[in-house]
Image (cartoon, coloured by chain):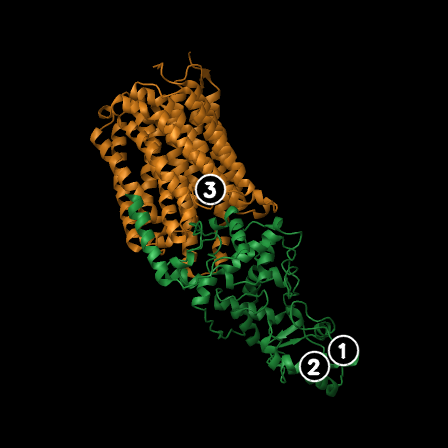
């Protein structure tokens, strides 16, 4: 299935960058997690303190790992979806250069040097944000024209998600990154809350779903179960996800009607995810997806994790649950299940699927299988551990016990969480081996 | 649509609310506090410490009044946070003294033994009492947290304290003491814990004083004004009782046998000490009410002779107690050191 239109050099470049950056991001995460039970590890060096490492951890995952992996996927997927090449190879080189050398690398360095903004999923400093917006505009110019040339009535659902993700992210990103610098306190927080959800809901989720929707029919040779459910899921997602953000500030001074609206939207989100996942699972049914093919297995697992993490999200947005678990490790577990579970598994599905189509690339299924099990074990155990830690914290906070009791009580959970960073790191190492060793694919 | 519904419209409501509830001339941050805020932001303080007390009993009972929109009108960008590893800091400004803050920033575990906060010793010149400008700015910012609200609705502290049990549970007392007190007061109460070095005045040497149960209870409940000793109301009463019992037990008996010139001691006391420490030794002298650190009540605590003499000769750094060795003779110093020990009522 060699397509003249694909640009394999750019797939390779983004694929390699994704893997290189996921190691750095995981390392930031592991060191930060160890500092929670060995706080003197930073040795008084400000650049190595927990806060800065945490900023770099999440921004690295968001941009360095997921961004690069999704771009690699798009360079192969869009020509296949539209029958047309992406706009320009030169533009692609610019996008690659800006994304990695004007966003992620300088972002990391600047954060460690003390230049950042204290806004979640927006920690890179404003000067880097400018380049993110520039890169997102380039991505739109690069990836969207083929869709419009192909004509909207023929678009497959993956295409809808790609268009939605790129357009909405380019609109939402400045809102989350710039507005709180100009609107004070609670008013800025209202926008900040929107972006916290949009980073996941409008950038990561649609691109992950586009990869899942792509990989399933491409490897099984069967069309998706229902075009109607695909469209329903898509439109509900883009209608409902942006209305979720305020659920990060329940019981705050933000007007109660906005909080309640966001909680209602969070509940509808659960309904939407059930629709999407039903469609995907019915597409997978009877295909023997688990043993059949590794990228397909990643896609199927990602679908299941998507359901779990979204229903959990709908649950914890409810006031009765939120008042207990908000601020606790429960939420950290939730975000790992989303980013390291659902999104990472979808990104690997897309990445490995296109990787093994590159003439001359190496592909080692045994190593990829190892990656699957190591990552799955790591993320699930970490999720369970953090969720349990969150419940312990919530109970102690609610009991009126001295604050430090909650810190002492979860120390063991934190040590275990750090330990689970090792299978995760090993899983990504296996993925690297899966894409750099093994038989060279025919040119 | 999301922007309008959940961003712009709430923004209008909050702006309105701010206009309605804010004092006419709200206090903004000083230049130094603003610089401190930048440090607070860049080091991710907001990712462990929220500044958002929710409108929930569990939050307000622990941290104080819920955060209103007008209090955040100078926060560019906001620092609400979504994770609490350490306590919320929206009302931190009035909770701890500056020397406590510096010592804690320099080496958190010296003050709070089980803390997991990073040490920011890089902001100091090698000692907690030698903060560089950045540390000063950061602590100035932290001292500002909750100030605007305090000015509008001052916190009225009920100075009453619960009567603590005199019955001591030494096992529990040791645990609570190690977790909360030993950082400053030292593992044996000598006032020589790892956190003591940067504090002024130094933490009390608990072994060198006898304390009445009322004195210990008051200090545990309210803290000691003008010193780094915070109040410990958040601890369960049984734990406070256990600590009180332990603290009173640190004192290892006294040798009061030596004869002294009582008349001389009494005269020196009423000439030089009573203005602050009071005629009856209760720390309630007329001049005492004006000073930052309340004068010792010798009725509620009895210093050892050694501590008493040292305070008389050298003064007590960090308090208005001045050295008397140049003004009084050795005989006068010794007599009054003995004399003040006579006020104590256990």
Is residue A387 visible to the viewer in this orientation of the structure? no
Q: Contact, CB < 8 Å: mark 1 with mark 2?
A: yes
Which chain, by letter, is green? B
Which label belongs to residue A230? none
Furthest residue in direction bottom, as rendered: B263
Which numbered marker is on residue B327? Answer: 1
Q: Is mark 1 on a helix, strand or loop?
A: loop
For image coordinates 60% across by 59% down, the residue present is B183
Give coordinates of residue B203: x percent, y percent.
63, 65
Labels 2 and 3 touching (C-beta < 8 A): no
In this view, A63 is above or below A115? above
**Inter-mark Cα distance, 1 to 2:** 10 Å
Judging by the rendered image, the residue that carries numbered circle 2 is B272
Q: How far, Cα to Cα, is label 2 from label 3?
A: 60 Å
Q: Which mark is residue A123?
A: 3
Determine the secondary structure under disc 2.
Answer: helix
Q: Quadrant of residue A292?
A: top left
Q: In this view, does A225 lie to the left or right of B290?
A: left
State the image coordinates of residue A367 (x, y, percent, origin top left): 45, 24
Residue A279 against residue A33 in the figure, above or below: above
């Amino acid at each position: 299935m060699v397509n003249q239109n694909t640009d394999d050099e750019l797939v390779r470049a983004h694929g390699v960058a994704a893997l290189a950056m996921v190691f750095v991001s995981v390392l930031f995460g592991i060191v930060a997690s160890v500092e929670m039970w060995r706080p003197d590890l930073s040795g008084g060096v400000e650049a190595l303190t927990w806060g800065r490492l945490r900023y770099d951890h999440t921004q690295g995952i968001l941009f360095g790992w997921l961004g690069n992996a999704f771009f690699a996927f798009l360079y192969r997927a869009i020509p296949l979806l539209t029958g047309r090449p992406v706009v320009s190879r030169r533009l692609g080189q610019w996008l690659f250069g800006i994304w990695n050398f004007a966003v992620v690398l300088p972002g990391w360095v600047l954060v460690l040097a003390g230049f950042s903004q204290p806004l979640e999923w927006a920690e890179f400093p404003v000067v880097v944000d400018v380049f993110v917006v520039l890169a997102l505009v380039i991505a739109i110019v690069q990836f969207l024209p083929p869709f419009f040339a192909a004509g909207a009535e023929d678009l497959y659902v993956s295409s809808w998600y790609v268009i939605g993700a790129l357009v909405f992210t380019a609109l939402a990103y400045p809102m989350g990154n710039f507005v709180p610098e100009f609107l004070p306190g609670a008013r800025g927080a209202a926008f900040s809350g929107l972006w916290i959800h949009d980073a996941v809901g409008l950038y990561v989720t649609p691109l992950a779903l586009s990869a899942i929707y792509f990989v399933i029919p491409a490897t099984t040779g069967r069309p998706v179960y229902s075009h109607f459910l695909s469209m329903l899921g898509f439109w509900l997602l883009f209608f409902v996800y942006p209305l979720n953000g305020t659920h990060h500030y329940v019981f705050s001074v933000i007007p109660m009607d906005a909080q309640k609206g966001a909680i209602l939207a969070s509940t509808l989100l659960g309904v939407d995810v059930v629709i999407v996942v039903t469609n995907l699972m019915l597409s997978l049914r009877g295909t023997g997806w688990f043993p059949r093919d590794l990228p397909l297995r990643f896609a199927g697992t990602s679908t299941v994790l998507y359901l779990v993490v979204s229903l959990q999200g709908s649950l914890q947005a409810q006031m009765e649950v939120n008042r207990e678990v908000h601020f606790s490790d429960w939420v950290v577990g939730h975000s790992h299940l989303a980013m390291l579970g659902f999104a990472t598994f979808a990104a690997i599905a897309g990445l490995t699927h296109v990787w093994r189509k590159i003439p001359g690339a190496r592909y080692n299924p045994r190593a990829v299988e190892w990656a699957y099990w190591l990552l799955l074990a790591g993320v699930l155990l970490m999720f369970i551990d953090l969720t349990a830690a969150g419940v312990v914290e919530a109970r102690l906070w609610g009991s009126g016990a001295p604050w430090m009791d909650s810190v002492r009580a979860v120390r063991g959970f934190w040590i275990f969480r750090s330990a689970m960073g090792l299978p995760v790191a090993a899983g990504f190492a296996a993925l690297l081996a899966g894409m750099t060793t093994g038989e060279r694919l025919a040119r | 649509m999301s922007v309008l519904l959940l961003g712009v419209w709430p923004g209008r409501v909050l702006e309105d609310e701010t206009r309605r509830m804010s004092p006419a001339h709200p206090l903004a941050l000083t230049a130094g506090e603003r610089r401190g805020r930048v440090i607070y932001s860049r080091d991710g303080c907001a990712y462990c410490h929220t500044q958002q007390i929710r409108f929930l009993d569990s939050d307000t009972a622990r941290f104080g009044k819920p955060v209103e929109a007008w209090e955040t009108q100078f926060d560019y960008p906001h620092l609400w946070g979504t994770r609490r590893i350490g306590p919320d800091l929206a009302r931190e400004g009035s909770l701890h003294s500056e020397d406590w803050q510096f010592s804690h920033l320099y080496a958190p575990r010296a003050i709070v033994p089980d803390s997991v906060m990073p040490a920011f010793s890089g902001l100091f010149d090698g000692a907690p009492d030698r903060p560089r400008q950045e540390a000063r700015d950061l602590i100035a910012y932290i001292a500002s947290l909750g100030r605007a609200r305090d000015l509008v609705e001052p916190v009225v502290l009920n100075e009453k304290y619960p009567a603590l049990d005199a019955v001591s549970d030494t096992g529990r007392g040791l645990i609570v003491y190690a977790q909360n007190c030993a950082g400053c007061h030292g593992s044996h109460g000598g006032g020589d814990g790892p956190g003591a070095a940067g504090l002024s005045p130094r933490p009390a040497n608990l072994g060198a004083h006898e304390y009445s149960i009322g004195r210990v209870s008051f200090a545990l409940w309210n803290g000691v004004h003008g010193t780094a000793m915070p109040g410990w109301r958040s601890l369960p009463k049984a734990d406070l009782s256990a600590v009180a019992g332990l603290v009173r037990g640190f004192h290892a008996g006294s040798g009061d046998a030596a004869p002294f010139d009582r008349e001389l001691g009494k005269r020196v006391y009423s000439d030089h000490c009573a203005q602050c420490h009071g005629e009856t030794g209760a720390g309630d002298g007329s001049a005492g009410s004006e000073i930052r650190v309340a004068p010792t009540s010798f009725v509620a605590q009895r210093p050892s002779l050694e501590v008493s003499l040292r305070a008389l000769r050298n003064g007590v750094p960090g308090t208005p107690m001045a050295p008397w060795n140049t003004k009084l003779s050795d005989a006068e110093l010794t007599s009054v050191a003995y004399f003040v020990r006579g006020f104590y009522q256990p």
